[in-house]
Amino acid sequence: MKRITIILLYFFVFVSIRAQTLFTFEDAVPADWTVTRGTLDLTTQTYKEGNCALQWTANANSTLSFPLTFKALSTNGALFYIYSPRVTNDTITISLISGSTTKRRANILCNFIGWREFNRSYTEYKTKTATNMTQVKIELKLNKNVAGSRKILFDNMEFNNTSNLDTKVHGPHMILDKEYLKGETSYLELYAFDKDIPISQPSSEELADLALIRERQARTLPTPTMLQTRRALDFVTALNIVENSDGTLSGKPIDITYGGLTDSYIQSVFVHLANLAASGSYQETFLKAVRYILDQGIGEGCN
């Protein structure tokens, strides 16, 4: 009996320690999270885990901070989801602080719409030494060329993540820290290539070659059967997509982790969308499904 008690005590202590680095925002805004020049609340309109997400609203440069005790090692990192309702090119800077000194700093560029994943090990920074952290500060720096208030959402924030540290794809929202990132960075390479090719009038030879390519690559999508169309509609219906009053989409969250986005799942998504598009009778359903799938972050900056 004594042995069982000790095991249970160890388990609850372990869960308690882990919970201090994980924030799911299901019940309330954490009491020790403070914000300057902005507000914090929970929203149920869109989220990635559970039924709520943290909503940060600001009309000017704003700072969110909270105490957090953990050790940044080579074997852990931060993993969370971030949502932007529009492209603003604002900058979000995340500072991990020890005492009064910033030991890690990460930047996110708000060049996207929808949910994106932040998955970064603590060796993907300028400073890589193991450090005991005591505080997190998140700063929102507004792009002065874009007017209006801002809303940024966070969900399932884990600052002691130990899984999928290397199996990830960094999307263009991570471009500001490109030099420090590991793993798959091909999206960043493409996004960082900002040299524009001058527009010129195509030659007759180029037009003829283009026509030849179109002729050889031409294909006709087969008309889906009733069963294929039904399965595609069932797939979309299961996502429970709803358009909110502010234009955002809510629905069943799509798992964009490395284990969730398997080849078979991605293939099934494209097959269902292709069948809806080819059916000719469900264009509105097709377009809403495409919007939602992109909004969930599939294909850009996910594991």
Image (cartoon, rainbow, N blue to C red):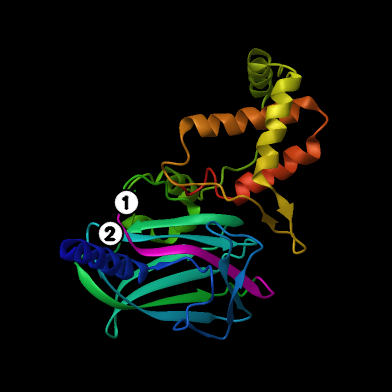
Q: Position of residue 246 (x, y in %)?
A: 75, 64
Label 2 to label 1: alpha-carbon separation: 7 Å
Residue beneath disc 2:
76
As for residue 248 lying within the magenta part, the answer is no
Q: Is residue 202 visible?
A: no
The N terminus: image quadrant: bottom left
163 is higher (above) or lower (below) than 216: below
- At a point 27% along the width and 65% down the height, the residue shown is 14
The C terminus: image quadrant: top left
Circle 1 crowding by C-alpha within 10 Å: few under 14, some 14–19, many from 20: many
Q: Position of residue 296 (x, y in %)?
A: 58, 50
The numbered disc on residue 150 is: none
At label 2, which amino acid type do we have? Asn
Corner quadrant of residue 214: top right
**Dominant SS type (magenta):** strand
Of label 2 and label 1, which has the lower sequence position?
A: 2
Corner quadrant of residue 112: bottom right
Circle 2 crowding by C-alpha within 10 Å: few under 14, some 14–19, many from 20: some
The numbered disc on residue 165 is: 1
Q: Where is residue 197 in the image (x, y as percent from the top left)?
A: 57, 42
Q: What kind of element bears circle 1?
A: loop
Q: Give the range drawn in magenta.
A: 146-162
Q: Can residue 154 be seen in this view?
A: yes
266 is higher (above) or lower (below) than 179: above
Q: Is residue 285 left or right of residue 302?
A: right
As for residue 157 lying within the magenta part, the answer is yes
Q: Which of 93 and 276 is in front in this view?
A: 276
Furthest toward the front, the residue is 1
150 is higher (above) or lower (below) than 296: below
Q: Do the residues labelled 2 and 1 touch (CB within 8 Å)?
A: yes
- At a point 41% along the width and 71% down the height, the residue shown is 94
At label 1, which amino acid type do we have? Leu
